[in-house]
Structure formats: C-alpha cells, structure tokens
Image (cartoon, rainbow, N blue to C red):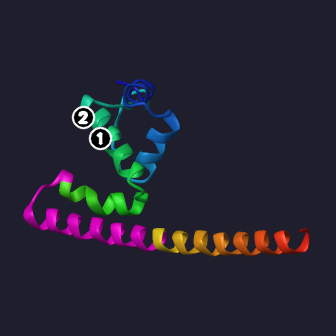
C-alpha cells in the first residue's frame, strides 16, 4: 500500500509517516517509480509508535526501545524496561516540578487576594 493509505489506516498524517521514516522508526520499500510501499505490518507499527509518543517518549527514546520489538530477547526486554523506567522517573520529577510551580503560584494568588482584601476593604 502507499503512504496515504498507511497514514489513513493508522490515523496519522502522511507527514507523520515520513517523519517516522526519517527518524529510522519505520522502513518502506520503494516501487520502480520511487514511491514508498508498505504492508499491513507498517500500519500496526505506526499505531504502536503513536502509543509510544502518547506515553511522552521522544523519537530517540523510541528508537532505543525498538530492539525489544524487532529482535525480542530477554536482554532487549530488560533494556527496554530499564529505559522506560528512566523515562517514568524523568516524568515523575517533571510532575513534581510542575506541582511546586503550581503551589508557588497558589501562594502568590493567596498573598495577592489578602493584599487586595486589606487594601480595598
């Protein structure tokens, strides 16, 4: 199938499919006319890539996880799990930073309300 059909069936844009190829996450064959050709396997792969992106993973991190999919082994599975744990820990820290930032903003809002209430009462 051609790139437009893969994109449509996977629920992504043609641009996304091209990006996945540029990042080395997806491979196509070329017709004699130079057009990209895909199989059902690539549709499923694009859907899988979308789930990984939805989990907040970068293209680089996804590339590090793909050996677990492409060449399953205990070592590749362990490496993928370790990498996902690192990403989870990074996200957890980012969430903690956001919570601290939100709390600081709440404190500022409380102080501003108190000032307003005393200044304009």
Q: Is residue 28 magenta?
A: no
Left or right: where 72 falls relative to 29: left
Range of the magenta residues?
69-94
The residue that mark 1 highlights is 45
- Is most of the magenta stretch helix, strand or loop? helix
Closer-to-camera residue (52/75) = 52
Q: Is residue 91 magenta?
A: yes
The residue that mark 2 highlights is 41
Instruction: Name the residue: 40% across, 70% down.
Output: 92
Instruction: Give the percent coordinates (x, y) of residue 18.
Output: 47, 41
Indicate the quadrant where residue 46 lies: top left
Left or right: where 40 falls relative to 6: left
- The answer for how far apart the CA atoms under marks 2 and 1 are is 6 Å
Closer-to-camera residue (77/30) = 77
Closer-to-camera residue (20/83) = 83
Q: Quadrant of the N terminus?
A: top left
Q: Are marks 2 and 1 in contact (CB under 8 Å)?
A: yes
Few, some or many C-alpha atoms within 10 Å of disc 1 (few <14, some 14-19, many ≥20)? some
Instruction: Name the residue: 37% across, 25% down.
Output: 9
Q: Secondary structure at mark 1?
A: helix
Vertical position of residue 87 compared to residue 12: above or below: below
Instruction: Name the residue: 27% across, 60% down.
Output: 65
Instruction: Give the percent coordinates (x, y) of residue 61.
Output: 36, 63
């Amino acid at each position: 199938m051609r790139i437009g059909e893969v994109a449509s069936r996977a629920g992504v844009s043609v641009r996304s499919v091209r990006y996945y190829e540029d990042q080395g996450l997806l491979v196509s064959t070329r017709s004699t006319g130079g057009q990209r050709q895909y199989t059902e396997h690539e549709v499923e792969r694009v859907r899988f890539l979308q789930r990984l992106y939805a989990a907040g993973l970068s293209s680089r991190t996804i590339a590090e996880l793909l050996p677990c999919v492409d060449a399953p082994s205990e070592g590749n599975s362990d490496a993928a799990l370790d990498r996902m744990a690192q990403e989870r820990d990074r996200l957890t820290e980012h969430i903690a930073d956001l919570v601290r930032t939100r709390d600081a903003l709440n404190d500022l809002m409380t102080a501003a309300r108190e000032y307003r209430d005393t200044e304009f009462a």
